[in-house]
Image (cartoon, rainbow, N blue to C red):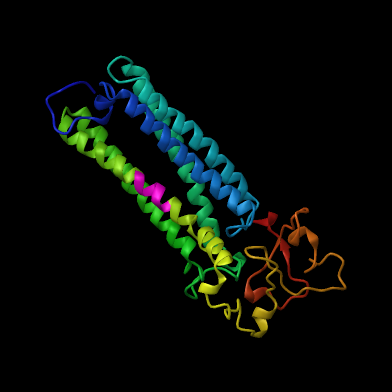
Amino acid sequence: MGYTDQSPVYISDIGATNLKPLFISCAGFQAIFFVGTLIMEYYLRTARKLQPYVSTKQPKLAIASIICAIIGQLGILFVSIFDTKNYHSVHLSMVGLFIAGCFFACFFNFFNSFIFGNYPHRLSPDHEKVIFGKHRWANVYMISFFLKIFWMLAAAALALLFGVYMKNGKDSTSAIFEWSISFWYGVLLVMWGIDLFPSAVKHYRVRHPEEFDNSFKPYDGNEKDDARTILTYGAPTYANFDPNNPEAPNHNNHDVLSNGPRSTLVQVPYDELETPNNYRNYNQV
């Protein structure tokens, strides 16, 4: 990847000119947004300001995603510091680190979206209508998952074409795909930002209740929905509460309504509500 008579030029070649300080600054700022978005999602879900995690695997996947994102973003920062002109081998190695780190960060994050979409019966009923059909996958989280998978496949295709054309000496065509990847990369940050949008909506509704219809009720009062009790926004819900059973989840328990230890019990599918004391720990997921 050197200086040639081509149009457009490689991004790395631009970063090796007198624009290197700008290149480093841009790499650093986008790294902050990339990692910060994942950290913010983890915080909002654990603080129950967004739909909380519905499986004990999800917080672990989120942390793994954050760690991989940090590694990947350090890679792109070093890519901008060790330019292709003076540190060509190190530059290429850091590009590989960036790609690997971002790939695994996306993999873990996308898998979390799949878990949300694959277990719609565990989602809070007091949500912005994320379920829109009878099929198990007819929910917003599964749509988000498929969109992210499409993004990853398209990014992989662009990266492959970039490498193939560069290897064959067609630098201009290769550079076109490199620039395409950079803009396509920004689409991922937009999708992650959209994932945080429900928290902003809820925060606005709390501060401006006069602008919304407060007559909305989370369920229509039918027999099966009555078994689903909303403890707080986004909190786990329970089926067949039995006040005489000491092991049953208590609707007034401070582990949900206060800052005490949080319950790990979640609701079960509608077709399982007929059995007595039908609740389970989501460690089984």
Residue sticking out furthest to the top: 86
Q: Position of residue 86 (x, y in %)?
A: 30, 14
| Quadrant, the N terminus | top left
Which secondary structure is most common in the magenta stretch? helix
Q: Nearer the viewer, residue 238 or 78?
A: 78
Residue 166: quadrant of the picture: top left
Membership of 188 in magenta stretch? yes
Q: Quadrant of residue 49?
A: bottom right
* Residue found at the very far left of the displayed protein: 5
Count of marks, rendered view: 0
Q: Nearer the viewer, residue 123 or 157?
A: 123
Task: Give left or right: position of 47 versus 243.
Answer: left
Let me know if residue 167 is in the magenta part.
Answer: no
Q: Is residue 196 above or below residue 140?
A: above
Residue 180: x and y, percent?
Answer: 26, 42
Pick the front one: 114 or 90: 90
Above-or-below relation of 218 to 14: below
Task: Please tell me which residue is depicted at 50% across the width and 76% down the height of the picture.
Answer: 134
| Residue 220 image offset from top left, x and y in percent | 60, 83
Q: Is residue 119 left or right of residue 156?
A: right
Task: Please report the residue visible at 21 percent of the width from the left and 34 percent of the height from the top.
Answer: 175
- Horizontally, is 171 left or right of 191 in the view? left
Instruction: Tell me where the magenta segment starts and ends, as one range.
Output: 186-191
Q: Where is the C terminus found, in terms of image quarters?
A: bottom right
| Residue pictured at 39% horizontal, 48% vertical | 188
